[in-house]
Image (tube, rainbow, N blue to C red):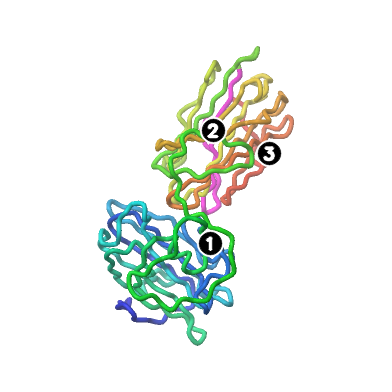
Amino acid sequence: MSQTLAPGGNAALPTEKVTVKCMHIGPDADLSALLLTAAGKVRTDEDFVFYGQPKSADGSVVYLDKKKTGDVCEHGITIDLAAIPSGIEKVAITLTIDPETPKTFASVTSLALAINNAAGAAVVAMEPKGDKENAFIICELYKRNGAWKVRNFSQGFTNGLAGIATAFGVDVGDSAPAATPAAAPPPPPPPAPPPVKVNLDKPKPTGKVNLTKGKSIKIEKTPEIIATGEWSNTWTKTLDYDLYAHIAYKDGRQEVIRYDRLSNKDGSVRHHGDLKSGGSGTIERVSVRMTDDIAAVGFSFYSAIENGQGSFSHAKARVSIDNGAGSTVVIQVEQMSVDPRRYTLYFGTCINRDGDAVEIVAHEDYSQRDSERQAVLYKDGTHKMDAGPENRQK
């Protein structure tokens, strides 16, 4: 049975992998963790784990994607206490509201936090309450005499996530001034050496953006993202290209959605149908719902040998990705291959790393000459050309 901690109370924790679970109703908020030295500072910006940096450098602390069911928002962070690096004495758990909203914790209801052991059972619970703050250090996991404990810290601040991060030594550039405590803060720790700046900005509508090879951009993760593959047959032949969606799941599974397999099992990735006849402005579409089990989705064009030789340059092949919320990313193919014996063009990858954004990376990679093997996408967002099974002829 879990122990409920009042503000200032503490309890012992098992030295194993624990999960911090936080639930609330009200304005959007973000859970984060800071790995702190005895001086109360991060060593580097990699000790700051949040939606934009979902894992510490050593992997001991991992941010979990937010989930929303009805009005209830659920957050999570896993902490492997046995793997916390030497020199780290505390892990601060914070919950923050974007100051631009401009909501505060006075609008938050049913706020509760629990720490579960490796078996999933709650060990400790607490119910923080706020008022005019937009940032909370809810609790601290700290080391005492070689063992780990947790304290209900319940300290409110203003200036949001950027303010708290700055107070603990993270360089967030011009994101915000340091946090202002809503009550008496702990004694200020000594200054840390200047770290590399961390970007706290959440993705905003981008309009239409052309993305070239090697570049990336984050767009808002909406309920459905549409990828459109397009080609214009302006050459002497009418070509038949096929848009492929390569899915990498977080458990390591891989799947390809295309003309002869139009959907994965739960329908989260769905091909809208094959177009066999070309023409000016011919398109194929794939819709994607970035569910929690998907790590990444990549897109490629393929044209079988039997369709007749042409080149991606002649067809002016292109792919655009639209989130339906004001962001359209066109993967701009600058070095369009004119080789008529290259049959696959891998455009780019949508990486599902946090609860608010999808990162789009442009690649423009071509298969080897005369290869009809598929590209393979991995769960870390990388891919390899010609590493998959051979395409079946249409």
- Comparing 330 with 301, the one in front is 330
Q: Are marks 3 and 1 in contact (CB under 8 Å)?
A: no
The total of numbered circles placed on residues is: 3
Q: Is residue 262 visible?
A: no
Amino acid on which the number 1 mark rests in the picture: Asp
Q: Is residue 341 left or right of residue 143?
A: right
Mark 2 vs 3: CB contact within 8 A: no
Density class for disc 3 (Cα within 10 Å; few <14, some 14-19, many ≥20) is some
Which callout, 2 or 1, points at the residue further toward the start of the chain? 1
Looking at the rendered structure, the kind of residue marked 3 is Asp
Label ID, residue 330: 2
Q: Position of residue 36 (x, y in %)?
A: 51, 73
Above or below for 185 versus 274: below
Q: Position of residue 58 (x, y in %)?
A: 59, 66
Quadrant for the N terminus in the image: bottom left
- At which x and y percent is residue 334? 65, 31
CA gap between label 3 and label 1 equals 42 Å
Q: Which residue is mark 3?
A: 386
What quarter of the picture does the C terminus occupy? top right
* Relative side of 389 to 293, left or right: right
| Image location (x, y in percent) of residue 236 | 65, 12
Residue stretch in magenta: 239-262
As helix, strand or loop, the secondary structure at mark 3 comes to: loop
Residue extending farthest to the bottom is: 145
Q: Amino acid at mark 2?
A: Val
Please tell me which residue lies in front, 245 or 163: 163
Residue under label 1? 171
Q: Is residue 26 left or right of residue 62?
A: left
